[in-house]
Amino acid sequence: MPDLKGKARLEDPFLNKGLAFTEQERESYGLHGLLPDKTRTLLEQVELEYQKLGKLTDPYAKNKYLMTLYHTNRVLFYRLISEHIEELLPVIYTPTIADSVMHYSKDFAEMTEAVFVDSEHPERIRDALLEASRSLEQVDLLVITDGEGVLGIGDWGVGGVMIAVGKLVVYTVASGIDPKRVLPVVIDNGTSRSELLNDPHYVGKKKPRLTGETYLQFVDRLVTEAEKAFPGVLFHWEDFGRENASVILERYRNRLTTFNDDIQGTGVMMAAAAHAVSKVTQKPLTEHRFLIFGAGTAGVGVAEQIKLELVRAGLSEEAARNQFYLIDRNGLITEDMLDLTDGQSRLARKEMELRGLTELPETIQHVMPTVLIGTSGQPGAFTQEAVTAMCAYQARPAIMPISNPTHLAEAKAEDLIRWSDGKALVVTGSPSKPVSYQGVSYEIGQANNALLYPGLGLGIVISKAKRVTDGMLSSAANSLGELQDLKRQGASLLPPVKEVRKVSRVVTEAVVQAAIHDQVNTKDIPDVKKAVAKAIWQAEYEN
């Protein structure tokens, strides 16, 4: 880091300590006269900031307050969140991050590190990457989005940059990846949202999005320039639209180090939940049937990742595929439907009697699934009738409405517990409070990717993996499943978010070990635990 002095040091979020600068440091860095006389420790600063935050009642107001701190004092920002992870993680990321995305243009503030690349100007990519990273030590990880498929709220153009920033914040809070070695990137590819095209305050490009091969060639150029600028960097793709997300992942997954959290991250989380369901029901994973309500990027990714687990458990590819049923806007997906994505086509059903099924309860009656997963963004889609249908065929049906944010969830946890008479094994996408029913407190697992992708990413960075293998993803899923006591009545299927640091450490170690096993590590790691411990960044002021 540069040896900045005076106001320049106070204006650098990585170097600024606020009132925590000692007398000796104030003398050395020329800060006398720029700060009041009082000195405070980091923990004293944390307590004061937490008190200020407590006076705000609106989550988005808290988010904006925290992001102001992010831009002024990065260590204090991360230490504050680390001290209050369970409370503040939903504020800095899902579900509150959706408000940051939607209000980005109206609340626009200077972005000091984020890279904005214009899809019509590939010649500018290299300079933008180098300039944005100039104050960083190096770049190990890029989180890249084009804002077309944000959470459950769709196309928000350059507002998607807040997703990239938010993801990297969670990386650091959860796994301890060094914030001085990561870079958020947003592709300004225009927008298809008329609300933004007609908004005088929108700060992005007011043009329809480039599509098809023209757009993919731009992404090729971005990848090429990023590889040159940051050799061995991990490409994390986030919130791309339905037509591009899986295409981009498949385009690069076998030739560079790349990962899509919407597809693979969500899939691994649900694979971990599926393993937990198998343990609770004492029924092998290979005997479960999965009905996925919502066959977009996330839904297909969930199916593909769980299918991988079935294959690894001994099923053939065809037998594993036959355990899945997907529902999209036109009903249960069958192979005769038009305009299916590649992923949907791979999972389409052949049975004649299933064609034309559009109602969820009726589909459940025909399919008799053991696991129902919601990735549709259709609030209330899991009705009491649908839950009753699940319970008619299964003693402990798994019902998992994981759509985000909260108002787009297919059902509420308390309704699912009540409608199922306490039988349902429930996982939600957003935080849910424990549900008390007939003397039992049911802890509700949250399929929060923050439990998964930070450890996965840090493990990839530590091992300097050439690519992300199926074995690394599977190891991540299985490591999550080892952390819960599932014998206790009402126990959560997934670890609580408050333990995200512990969980990330376990995931990181599992991923590094899998990279070594799969022989994709390019860095020699004689002791995995020591390598992981050494790589974890701590939110402490440097002397």
Image: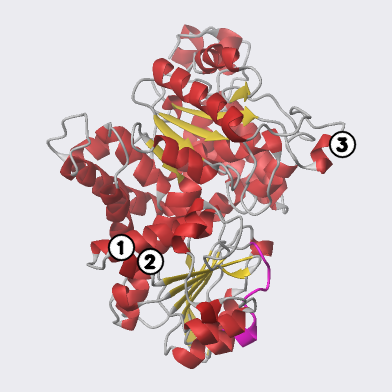
Q: In the image, residue 137 lies at what x, y percent?
A: 41, 18
Q: In the image, residue 130 lies at what x, y percent?
A: 50, 13
Query: Which residue type carries mark 1?
Result: Glu
Tell me what residue is drawn at x 59 percent, y 40 percent.
Answer: 163
* Quadrant showing the C terminus: top left
Q: Nearer the viewer, residue 49 or 301?
A: 301
Helix, strand or loop: magenta stretch? loop
Is residue 207 visible to the viewer in this orientation of the structure? yes
Seen in the image, is 405 located left or right of residue 504? right
Q: In the image, residue 353 lies at what x, y percent?
A: 53, 82
In the picture, the disc for residue 198 is 3
Residue of label 1: 317
Choose the circle earlier in sequence order: 3 or 2.
3
Residue situated furthest left in the rendering: 526
Seen in the image, is 513 located left or right of residue 478? left
Tell me what residue is drawn at x 29 percent, y 60 percent.
Answer: 478
Q: Point out the frontmost of discs 3 and 1.
A: 1
Q: Which residues are magenta?
A: 377-386
Tell me what residue is drawn at x 50 percent, y 89 percent.
Answer: 391
Choose the circle earlier in sequence order: 3 or 1.
3
Query: Which residue type carries mark 2?
Result: Arg
Q: Disc 1, disc 2: CB below 8 Å?
A: yes
Query: Secondary structure beneath disc 3?
Result: loop
Residue of label 2: 321
Q: CA distance from mark 1 to mark 2?
A: 6 Å
Q: Nearer the viewer, residue 39 or 496?
A: 496
Is residue 535 visible to the viewer in this orientation of the structure? no
Figure quadrant of residue 302: bottom left
- Give the answer, above or below, for where 8 lies relative to 528: above
- Give the answer, above or below, for where 5 lies relative to 61: above
